[in-house]
């Protein structure tokens, strides 16, 4: 009898182990088609009893092995879309000071800019995950900040979020 505990423990196996089990089951199914070998080994009763179970296990393993990469791709795609959606909302709701700080990136077409460590605007952008520190080492009370790729791409597509002009940039 198959228990729920056994299925949960199976799910903890690595993909390499699942593939090994799958290959073993497929080999058993293929061997079961060779009547002369089975008759020579006198294992016909065993094969007849076990083959339906092995076929079910093979189908389960095949589904499990194939669904893992599909799940990983779908999760990454969903998280990327979710991040882009949240970032777009943040970028539409920027204060004027935050817009001025981000204009420096867009006007110069750079991914890294230097700001004072005590700059509260930049720290706010960092807490919203629009900017991040590119290094843990400060240079004369300034820190280098990179703009997130998602934020940079959105601002390139929608420059109206910032309304940058050369005179406004810091």
Image: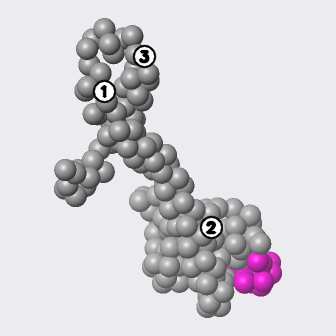
**Residue at position x 32%, y 13% from top?**
39
User: Which of the pair 48/118 is nearer the observer?
Assistant: 48
Magenta region: 158-170
The residue to which callout 2 is attached is 150
User: Which of the pair 141/147 is nearer the observer?
Assistant: 147
Counting residues from the start of the chain, the first of labels 3 and 1 encountered is: 3
* Gap between marks 3 and 1 measured at Cα: 11 Å
Disc assigned to residue 166 = none
The residue to which callout 3 is attached is 34
Q: Position of residue 161 (x, y in %)?
A: 72, 84
Select label 1 or label 2 by which is in front.
Answer: 1
Q: Is residue 16 visible?
A: no
Say which quadrant the C terminus sits in: bottom right
The residue to which callout 1 is attached is 47
Residue neighbourhood size for the residue with mark 1, other residues' Cα within 10 Å, grouped as few (<14), some (14–19), many (≥20): some
Q: Position of residue 22 (x, y in %)?
A: 39, 35
Q: Position of residue 32 (x, y in %)?
A: 39, 23
Residue 162 image-quadrant placement:
bottom right
**Residue at position x 20%, y 55% from top?**
3
Residue neighbourhood size for the residue with mark 2, other residues' Cα within 10 Å, grouped as few (<14), some (14–19), many (≥20): some
User: Which of the pair 127/65 is nearer the observer?
Assistant: 65
Q: Is residue 75 visible?
A: yes
Q: Is residue 31 above or below residue 106?
A: above
């Amino acid at each position: 009898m198959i228990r729920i505990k056994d299925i949960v423990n199976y799910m903890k196996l690595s993909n390499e182990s699942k593939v090994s089990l799958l290959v073993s089951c497929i080999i058993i199914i293929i061997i079961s088609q060779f009547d002369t070998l089975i008759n020579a080994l006198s294992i016909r009763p065993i094969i007849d009893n076990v083959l339906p179970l092995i076929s079910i296990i093979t189908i389960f393993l095949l589904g499990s092995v194939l669904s893992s990469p599909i799940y990983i791709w779908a999760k990454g795609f969903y998280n990327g879309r979710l991040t882009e959606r949240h970032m777009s909302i943040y970028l539409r709701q920027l204060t004027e000071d935050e817009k001025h700080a981000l204009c420096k990136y867009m006007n110069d077409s750079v991914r890294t800019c230097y700001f004072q460590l005590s700059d509260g605007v930049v720290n706010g952008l960092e807490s919203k995950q629009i900017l991040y520190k590119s290094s843990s080492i400060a240079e004369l009370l300034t820190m280098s900040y990179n703009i997130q790729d998602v934020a940079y791409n959105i601002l390139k597509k929608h420059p109206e979020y910032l309304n940058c002009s050369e005179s406004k940039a810091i």
